[in-house]
Image (cartoon, helix red, strand yellow):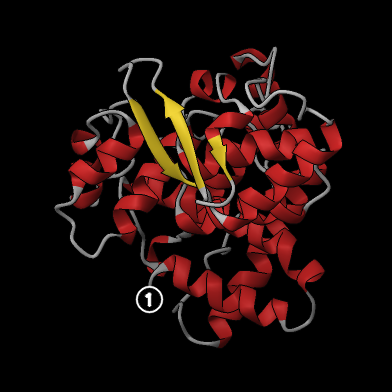
Amino acid sequence: MELSQAIRKFLNHQKSMGMDRAFPYWVDLAQFDAFINGCNCCYTSKITDATPDQVQKFLEYIWIQENGNVKKITKVMKSLNDFDQYCLEHRWLTGSMMNGVTLPNGPISTEVKPFHLTFIPPLLFSAIMAKLLRGPVALKQRVMLLMLAMTGMRIAELKSITWEDIDFEKKSITVKGVKSGMTRVLPLFCDLSDHLQQYKQETKNTASEEALIFPNEHLVKLTRIFRKFLNDHGFIKGLISLRTLRSTYANLLYLSQKDRSQMMYISALMGKDVSPHLNLIKDMLGFKSNQQDI
């Protein structure tokens, strides 16, 4: 059984007792799944890959990234313990993945190589989107991050979008490429459309359709906003960056296509040839360090 599949079954069990109970597990275990995939340089891992050694490395990774945040690492360890017990009860594991695992304390002796996800796996991405769509996030910040996550546009392109570029009737966004100079039309999904219309009404930024939707925004500011969002909702520092939203969108487009040869279509939506990047996904090596930035 795949690790992500086992986690989903565990989360469905928790959801039956309430969504508020399930979400903290969702965040912790989705990040654990992403970490194991990253360590194994694969797109998905088996539940048997979740060994005590890997669990210990994951906890030590959090310890380093969170500067010894005992509260956060204790919470993650509880999530892993509960998931471990559930897997043992269903006989998905022959032995506990928590056997011999200890709470990190002080200097780390085990070599833990820092890494950053080059794209967000589906289980983790769905947790992020759930908080973006329904969590306590300021409307402007919610809309900006949703625009990046649900369109795959570059940050520089986001800054240049005007209300004139948004067609709420045809559910489309016209993007003027900042690198290629070419114009492309992206789909406007319902959730994003609803939040955009709400933002347009609340900001009273309707005097001119040529007005920029997000004036005075820049990379450093957006990066801080995204980091704060992740930290406020329990995600590990440094595991995900703002740039990964674009590569994740490309991956999800690729996975949604029945015909895996339609890379020209995806490249057209992304405004760049992404076939070298997507070929790595095709080969199930999504976390290789030689992935190209898109």
- Relative side of 270 to 227, left or right: left
Out of 41 and 203, give the one closest to the viewer: 203
Out of 39 and 275, give the one closest to the viewer: 275
Q: Quick one: quadrant of the N terminus?
A: bottom left
Q: Which residue is found at the position 47% from the left and 50% from the top?
A: 34
The spot of residue 290 in percent (x, y) is: 25, 28
- Relative side of 139 to 227, left or right: right
Q: Which residue is mark 1?
A: 1
Out of 77 and 200, give the one closest to the viewer: 200
Q: Is residue 226 above or below residue 80?
A: above
Q: Using the rendered view, name the quadrant where residue 47 is placed.
A: bottom left
The spot of residue 175 in percent (x, y) is: 45, 29
Q: Amino acid at mark 1?
A: Met
- Relative side of 239 to 291, left or right: right
The spot of residue 78 in percent (x, y) is: 73, 61
Out of 197 and 144, give the one closest to the viewer: 197
Q: Using the rendered view, name the quadrant where residue 10 is placed.
A: bottom right
Q: For numbered disc 1, what is the local secondary structure?
A: loop
Q: Is residue 214 above or below residue 135?
A: above
Q: Can residue 164 be seen at all in this image of the molecule?
A: yes
